Amino acid sequence: MITGIGMVTPLGHDTPSTWASLVEGRSGAGPITQFDPSSFAVQFACEVKDWRAETYLGGKLCRELDRFSEFAIVAADEAVRDAGLSITEEREERAGCIVGTGVGGLATIEFNARELESRGVRRMSPYVIPAVSGNLAAGQITIRHRLRGPSYCTTSACATGAHAVGEAAEWIRRGHADVMVAGAAEAPITRVGMGGFQAMRALSRRNDAPARASRPFDVDRDGFVAGEGAAILILERLEHAHRRGAKIYGELTGYGASSDAFHICQPPPTGEGCARSMKMALSEAKLAPSAVGYLNAHATSTGIGDVAEANGIRTAFGAAAESLWVSSTKSMTGHTLGAAGAIEAAISLLALHRGVVPATINVDRVDPAIGLDVVPNAARTKSFDHVMSNAFGFGGANATLVFSSLRGAMASS
C-alpha cells in the first residue's frame, strides 16, 4: 500500500503545488540559472526554481549534501508527514529505504574538480565523497527517520525510480519489511550534464520557446528537455497501514522489468522490450489490458523513443490500446532522468486517487505513427481502478508499475 507521497519538481517544492501545476498544464521549463549557459547550444531546462535547501534542512546538514540528496530528503520528509508515519523503536528494523539516482552528485564532482585544479587538494571539502555517492540520499534518509531495515540505491538510468519503488515493494511482499521509503532523485543541470546530452543531440534546441519545447508525441518534437527533482513514496504492508489508520492512495499490484538487449541509447523500433515489461506488470497484477484506465508514458519527446513506446503499448494492450488514455507529464516536468520513474509513479497514484488525468501539453499535431489517445493539452476527469507507469533507461532497462485502488486490487485478487 502507498500511504505517503512527497515531491520536489520543476513545478513545485511539494506535492500540492506540483499537482496543481500538472492539472493546469503549466510547463516547468525556463532559462538555466545554475550556471552561465551562454556558450551552450541549449540554454534552458526544467529546474527546481528558487531552491534554498537551508530553508528546509538547515545549513549544517546542507554542507554534507549534493543537490540531488537535498531534493530526496525534503521529498522524504513530506512523504513521511503525508503518511502520518512514526517509526517506533520496536519497528525500526522492519523499515527500510531504497532511493535511487541516475548520475549522483554531478555538481559536487564538477565543483571540486575545479577547486582541485585551481586551489589544490587542501581546499577540497571532507564531504566530497559522501555528497557524490549515489546511495547517500537513502543513507541520509535512514539516519533522519531511523530506518534500520534494508537501505540501498538503484541505478538504471531513467528507469531508476521505478525500479526503486518496485524493489521496495518486493521487500514487503517477501515478508522482510513492514514499511519502505522509496523513490529517486536527480540534479543533472550542470555544465557536464547539459553538455553531455547536448553532444548526444538528445535535447530540444527551442531556446526561443522553452515552455513549448517538451512535446512528446507531437510531430514536431526535436528532443527532450532536461529536468531535476525527486519523489518519494511510503509503501506499507496492508495490515500495518490499517492498524494505524493510514489513508491509502493505492496498492502496487504489478511490477515488470525487462532489458532490450539492443543498443546503449536507443530502444528497438518495435518496442518489444518495453512491451515485455508491461505484459509482466499486467500479469503480476492479474489484469486484462482493458482494466487499465490510464498510462503515464515514459515518452521523453524524442523521435525514436516516443514511437517505440507507442508500438510497445499497442503490442502489450492489443485492441484495448484504442481506448486507453496515455499522457506524458514530461511535457511539463521535463525529463528528470533517474527521478522520472518515481515522479511519474507519484503522479499516476494521484491520478488514480483523484480521478484526474494530466495532459500531454504542447501537442499541436500528433505524430501519425503514435496511434494513441495522448490526452492532448487539457487534463481530463475519469474514475478508474488501475493505472500504469512506464520508465525506460539507457542500456535498454525497462520498468513498469501498475497501481490499483483498494477496490480494484480486491477485484483482481
Image (cartoon, rainbow, N blue to C red):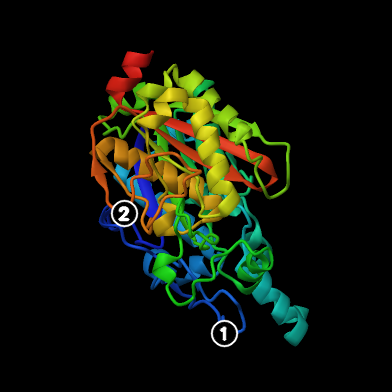
Q: Quadrant of the C terminus?
A: top left
Kindly identify the amino acid type of the residue bearing the numbered disc 1. Answer: Ser
Q: Nearer the viewer, residue 284 or 98?
A: 284
Measured from the top left, where is residue 132 in percent x and y? 65, 61
Circles 1 and 2, Cβ within 8 Å, touching? The answer is: no
Measured from the top left, where is residue 286 in percent x and y? 44, 16
Q: Residue at x 51, y 63 (%)?
A: 225
Measured from the top left, where is residue 362 in percent x and y? 38, 59
* Residue placed furthest toward the front: 368
Q: Which residue is mark 2?
A: 377
Number of numbered markers: 2
Q: Residue at x 51, y 43 (%)?
A: 369
Q: Assess disc 1: are there few (<14), some (14-19) or many (≥20) residues with their C-alpha within 10 Å of its C-alpha.
A: few
Among numbered discs 1 and 2, the one appearing first in the sequence: 1
Q: Is residue 57 above or below residue 121?
A: above
Q: Secondary structure at mark 2?
A: loop
Q: Nearer the viewer, residue 398 or 251?
A: 398
Q: Is residue 4 left or right of residue 204?
A: left
Q: Which mark is residue 38?
A: 1
Q: Secondary structure at mark 1?
A: loop
Q: Is residue 109 left or right of residue 207?
A: right
Kindly identify the amino acid type of the residue bearing the numbered disc 2. Answer: Asn
Q: Is residue 203 above or below residue 318?
A: below
